[in-house]
Amino acid sequence: MNTEKQKNFPLVSVITINYNQSGVTIEFLNSMQHCTYPNLEIGVVDNASPTDNPEIIKEKFPAINFIKSKKNLGFAGGNNLAVREAKGKYMLFINNDTEVEPGFLEPMVGLLENNPEIGMVSPRIQYFHSDHILQFAGFTPIHPITTRSFAIGFGEKDTGQYNMTCETGSIFGAAMLVPRIVMEKVGLMAEVFFLYYEEHDWAAHILRAGYKVYFQGESLVLHKESISTVKNSPFQIYYMTRGRVLYARRNSTGMLKLLSLLYIYLITIPKITLEYLIKGRPDLMVAFWKAMYWNIIHHKEVYNTEKLTN
């Protein structure tokens, strides 16, 4: 690689998590081979895959930093493990069930290089197995009471209508670029989430620290979606519900916090319970209630923040 050319491009540490999907991770790494950004290091964390053979990843890509976790640390914990070994000025957190356009990284890095007020940025994301159908072109702000937001562009045909650069209400964890200096000031993703809502919690903390969160529509990533988790499964419902309530607890105070928790416990619980009963899905109802119970019995530890100390 041309050393002189590298000097003009800050080092980006690409971080992805593998869990029982080595074949999918290899497909992602193959797509990264075509990335035109000239100054990269790649870290892959195997999150203690129980039935996979993750060693094949290192065999096929010996130049990557391959980290084997002794236990499943979840999305936040796995990424944080790699961050502590990464050397980049910027960290790209990207799902292993994605494939990238060759020039996707330059617009995001350029945006951060030219505006130190930006704390994180996500690209435009299309569904991989579709004809240019969008999954993400930004988020509306997360409502302080309902803890809900909406993905802009979701399900729309991508005709270039979102090829723009603008602020967004939150970040999308499938692909997000974050400066190291922001992590040093704000901290890392909160590992208490394990799965779902941790990127929104992180974005909320970064926004409160005075930074901005951006969408870069000139960058494109293709997302295969839900290969490592089963949609509408008890597993997903448990962690999605657990994360939503946990987000409300960590990111609101005073009257807003009271209203948010009242909304969840007095409106959301009866509504969702009834929906699962009508659908004949007692398994989802049990997972939902387990998530609520987890939030009732866990208190102070949910407010811990992981620090970047390397």
Image (cartoon, rainbow, N blue to C red):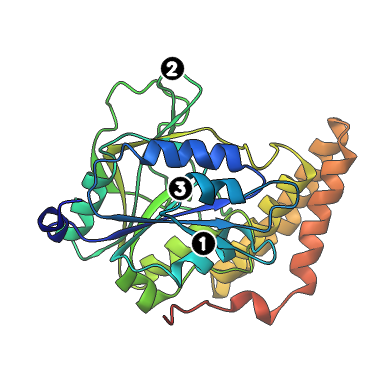
Cβ atoms under marks 2 and 1 closer than 8 Å: no
> Residue 118 at x, y = what percent?
26, 61
Disc 2/disc 1 C-alpha distance (Å) = 31 Å
Name the residue tied to disc 2.
131
Asked whether, in this view, residue 211 is left or right of residue 257, the answer is left
Q: In the current view of this chain or complex, which residue is farthest to the top?
A: 131
**Up/down of 284 relative to 185, above or below:** above
**Up/down of 238 relative to 128, above or below:** below
Query: Could you tell me which quadrant the C terminus lies in?
Result: bottom left
Residue type, numbered disc 3:
Phe
Q: Nearer the viewer, residue 85 or 175?
A: 85
Label 3 SS: loop
Name the residue tied to disc 1.
79
Closer mark to the observer between disc 3 and disc 2:
3
- Image mark for residue 173: none
Name the residue tied to disc 3.
61
